[in-house]
Every structure is written in structure tokens, then in C-alpha cells.
Image (tube, rainbow, N blue to C red):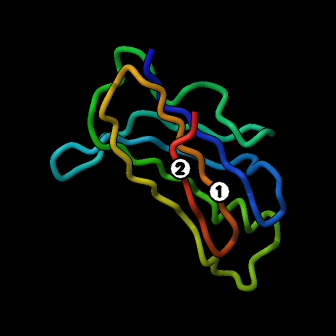
Amino acid sequence: MGRITTHVLDTSIGKPGRDIAVALYRLEGDGRTPLATTRTNSDGRCDQPLLEGDNMQPGVYELDFHVGVYFAKQDTSETALPFLDRVTLRFGVAKAQEHYHVPLLVTPWSYSTYRGS
């Protein structure tokens, strides 16, 4: 069964990114259709898949991670204005029956991602 999942790792401290707001959108035409909103748990993961089963369709999706609030709580920013606030990852789903795990590795100043399993 196809699904989209994610997790967040704060690589600046080597720990899960806890309590980060995450939103999933499907891109359609010139706009974004909201599909799911959640927060990461104490392990930096979402408790449920963001999308799964018959709701999975081939197409382009975006994940928004609201990391600015997270880093402000960690008191790691040098100023009141964080360098990273919202990180948006745009990715394609070619085969709706597959598992797309899209993690975010983040620091207050950088981020990366990959297709996990």
C-alpha cells in the first residue's frame, strides 16, 4: 500500500526534531491542495502516514516544515529573526503504490533530504 511518511532530525544536536508542525500539499495547476497537517512526536516522526492508500496519486507534492518556531524554542538562533523559518520540500510521486519516506535533516542554518525507506 502506498504512503507518504516523514521524520525530522536536528543534526546540529544529533536528536529528533520534536513538536514541529508539518503540512502536506498536492500541487494542482497553479495552486496547492492541503492534504494533511500534523506535528512531529518526541522521536521526530509523525504518528500516522501523511497520505496513504487510495488517496495516494501520482503527482507533485510539497511538505512544509515549520522549523523557525522549533529553533526559537531551542534558543539556537543568533537573532530574533531565524535564518530558516519554513522549509518546503517539493517531490514527485511516480508510483502511488510505493512508500515515499521524505525526511528532513535540519540545522538552524541548513537542511537536506533524501528518499528513505
Element class at badge 1 = strand
Residue 105 picture location, percent across and down: 65, 56
Query: Going by the image, does 28 lie left or right of 117?
Result: left
Q: What is the crowding at mark 1: few (fewer than 14 residues within 10 Å), some, or many (at least 20)?
A: some
Q: Quadrant of the N terminus?
A: top left
For residue 117, which quarter of the picture?
Answer: top right
Q: Residue furthest bottom?
A: 79
Q: Amino acid at mark 2?
A: Tyr
Q: Nearer the viewer, residue 76 or 57?
A: 57
Residue 97 picture location, percent across and down: 38, 19
Residue 112 picture location, percent across and down: 57, 61
Q: Residue at x 34, y 36 (%)?
A: 93
Q: Amino acid at mark 1?
A: Leu
Q: Residue at x 58, y 39 (%)?
A: 6
Q: Residue at x 49, y 52 (%)?
A: 64
Q: Nearer the viewer, residue 23 or 54?
A: 54
Element class at badge 2 = loop
Residue to which mark 2 is pinned: 114
- Up-down: is 14 above or below 29? below
Q: Are marks 1 and 2 in contact (CB under 8 Å)?
A: no
Q: Which label sits in the foreground, 1 or 2?
A: 2
Q: Residue at x 74, y 37 (%)?
A: 41
Query: Going by the image, does 53 lie left or right of 79?
Result: left
- Up-down: is 51 above or below 60? above
First in sequence: mark 1 vs mark 2: 1
Residue to which mark 1 is pinned: 105
